[in-house]
Image (cartoon, rainbow, N blue to C red):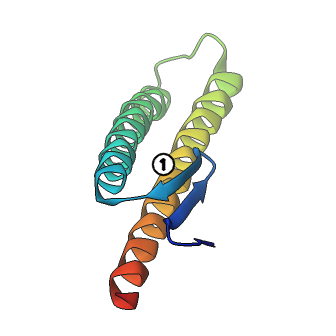
Amino acid sequence: MMLPNRGRVFSSKLGTVAPVNSSDRAKIEKQLEEDMARAMADFSNIERATRKILLDASAGIPLSDGKLRLVQAGQRAKLAFQKYEEILKQYREFLAQSTDERDEQ
């Protein structure tokens, strides 16, 4: 969405920022990169814990709560990955919008 003589509006689930000048753009990009790194670290940690549960189960180590523990670990990994995917999508949209703005100039 263009604002008359004021630049572009960036809108995502993180909120709307208007207008987006080069300083704002750099701040938004940095925030999105930090959010992506955090989300990927969360996913990696959860995935590592899930793998350990699976290895313990396959090694014959009895799990106190068995199937429930495995299901919950899988659900946590899925949610963490979905969060990462959403932030990555926002980052791609932001970069695409920035590219479009440069092409218009």
**Which quadrant would residue 40 be assigned to in this image?**
top left
How many numbered tags mark residues here? 1
Residue sitting at x 46%, y 19%? 61
What amino acid type should be assigned to the residue bearing mark 1? Tyr
Whole-percent x, y for residue 13 in the image: 63, 48
Image quadrant occupied by the N terminus: bottom right
Residue that extends furthest to the top in the rendered view of this protein: 64
Residue positioned 59% across, 44% down in the render:
78
Residue 48's image quarter? top left
Crowdedness near tag 1: few (<14), some (14–19) or many (≥20) residues, C-alpha within 10 Å: many
Residue at far front of view? 5
- Say if 53 sits above or below 37 in the image: above
Mark 1, residue position: 84
Residue 73 horizontal side relative to residue 93, left or right: right
Residues 86 and 25: in front is: 25
Q: Is residue 31 left or right of residue 71?
A: left
Q: Nearer the viewer, residue 105 or 85?
A: 105
Rendered location of residue 9, percent (x, y):
56, 62
Q: Position of residue 67 (x, y in %)?
A: 69, 28
Q: Residue at x 38, y 46 (%)?
A: 36
Q: Is residue 68 left or right of residue 35?
A: right
Element on which disc 1 rests: helix
Residue 46's place in the image compared with 78, above or below, is above
Quadrant of the frame with the C terminus: bottom left
